Each structure stands twice: as structure tokens, then as C-alpha cells.
Image (cartoon, grey):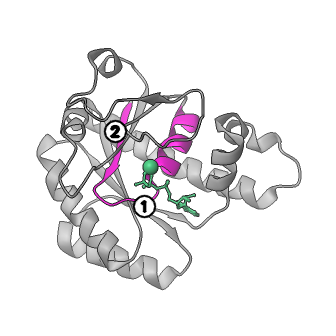
Amino acid sequence: MKYLVTSIKGGVGKSSIALNLAAHSGSQYITNDITTSAIEEVIQIPINKKRIPAELTKLENTVFDLGALSSLLDPKIAHAASFCDVVIIPTRTDPRSIAATIKTHQLIKDAGKPIVIIINHFKDNKKHDAARSQLLNALGKVPILAIRETTLFDRVSGDGIEWFLNIQNVKGLYMLQRTAEAHSVVYDRITAIGRRGQ
Ligand SMILES: Nc1ncnc2c1ncn2[C@@H]1O[C@H](COP(=O)(O)OP(=O)(O)OP(=O)(O)O)[C@@H](O)[C@H]1O
Ligand SMILES: [Mg+2]
């Protein structure tokens, strides 16, 4: 399975979701973000490259975390959308994020790939529900999943992918284990949507 996580908006949780999805699905994590932390397993694509290098397009199991450089899509994003099985657009619930998510969806949909939106990083269910209806109004029937505000992502970026994979063995972290289970359900649903499109 080849996943593409993208948005023209910064700070919506692309890297957090992409890293955890890669860990969950045993995929290689690949990004165009030069500020990514020193996690060893990361492959970074230089900013000046217009296309995803051929050897990376051939890998079986990959998660591409591709942020935009401006309100224009990085050309690598369109290239990745052409060979990935499913596109994931994380969004927050504020108006600018929703507008950027709608724009990203419009830019990426020509690739003809299944697109999943994740409403991410919210505490208030009302905000989630409002964001969801705005997105459905603007985009029609699109799969929308949710990931609440959590300390899990901080733990993964601090302690690494291995930690996420072993979370079920960590004692005394009952709530985080529950969160990891909820995230796994989200990642499995994305994978199922990607398989259906293949
Ligand atoms: N569900 C969440 N709960 C709590 N914190 C979150 C959640 N999602 C993201 N964050 C935090 O929000 C910040 C931005 O997330 P992240 O770096 O994943 O976004 P991004 O879209 O990759 O940003 P950029 O565009 O800068 O690459 C990080 O500090 C991350 O830990
Ligand atoms: Mg990022």
C-alpha cells in the first residue's frame, strides 16, 4: 500500500499521522520536510526535486508526508498522487484549516485516487461536528475520520516508532493504549479504502 499524507496547510498533523501510520502499517516513511527530527528510518527528498525519485516510487509499502511549500502544490505532491493508492488530508477545525482542506481536496482530486479527510487535533465535539458538516457541504460524500487531541503523538516523536509499535506492552499507560487502539482503527479504515480503489 502506498499512502500520501498532504495538505497545503501547515501544522495540521501531517507528519504526526504519517509517522504513526507508517509504524502501524510497517511502511517506509518518506517526507519533503527538511526539519524532520533525527528519526533514523526517515527518507528525506530534497526540496529542489520536482518528482519523487524513481527508486522510491517502486517501494511496496510507503507513507509519503508531503507538505506544500506555499499555497501552490509542490509538484512532487501531484506526482505522488499519481502512483499512491490513497490520499489522506489531515485538517484542524478552524476556518483557515477547513478552507485549506477544501482547496487541497480540489487540487488533488484530478489524480482520481480515493481521498480520506481526518479531522485532527480537536477537543470539542461541537467543533468536530461543525467542521464535518462544512466539509460535507463543500465536498459532497467524502470519507471523514477523526483523531482527537492526544499526547500519543508527542510520545512517538520523542520516543520513536518502536515505542508506538510496543505500546501494548507498556505498563501503566492504559489511556495511551486506548488511544493507540483508536488510531489503529483509523489507519485500518484508510488501508481498506486504499485497497478498494486498487
Ligand atoms: N491529535 C493531536 N493531538 C495533539 N497534538 C497534535 C495532534 N496532531 C498534531 N499535534 C501537534 O501539532 C503540531 C503540528 O503537528 P505536525 O508537525 O504533525 O503537523 P504538520 O502538518 O506535519 O506540520 P508542518 O506543516 O509544519 O510539517 C505538533 O506539535 C504535533 O505534536
Ligand atoms: Mg510536517
Q: Nearer the viewer, residue 31 or 113?
A: 31
Q: Which of 69 and 77 is in front in this view?
A: 69
Nearer the N terminus, badge 1 or badge 2? Answer: 1
Residue type at numbered disc 2: Gly
| Residue stretch rendered in magenta on the structure | 2-25
Whether disc 1's CB lies below 8 Å from ligand 1 is answered yes
Q: Which of 69 and 1 is in front in this view?
A: 69
Residue 18 sits inside the magenta stretch = yes
Seen as rendered, the residue at the extreme bottom is 126
Q: Residue at x 53, y 81 (%)?
A: 124
Q: Name the residue beneath numbered marker 2.
A: 194
Q: Where is residue 187 in the image (x, y as percent from the top left)?
A: 49, 46
Seen as rendered, the residue at the extreme left is 110
Choose mark 1 or mark 2, whichever is in front: 1
Q: Name the residue beneath numbered marker 1.
A: 12
Q: Residue at x 51, y 30 (%)?
A: 42
Identify the secondary structure beneath mark 1: loop
Q: Position of residue 71 (x, y in %)?
A: 21, 58
Using the image, determine if residue 96 lies above or below residue 169: below
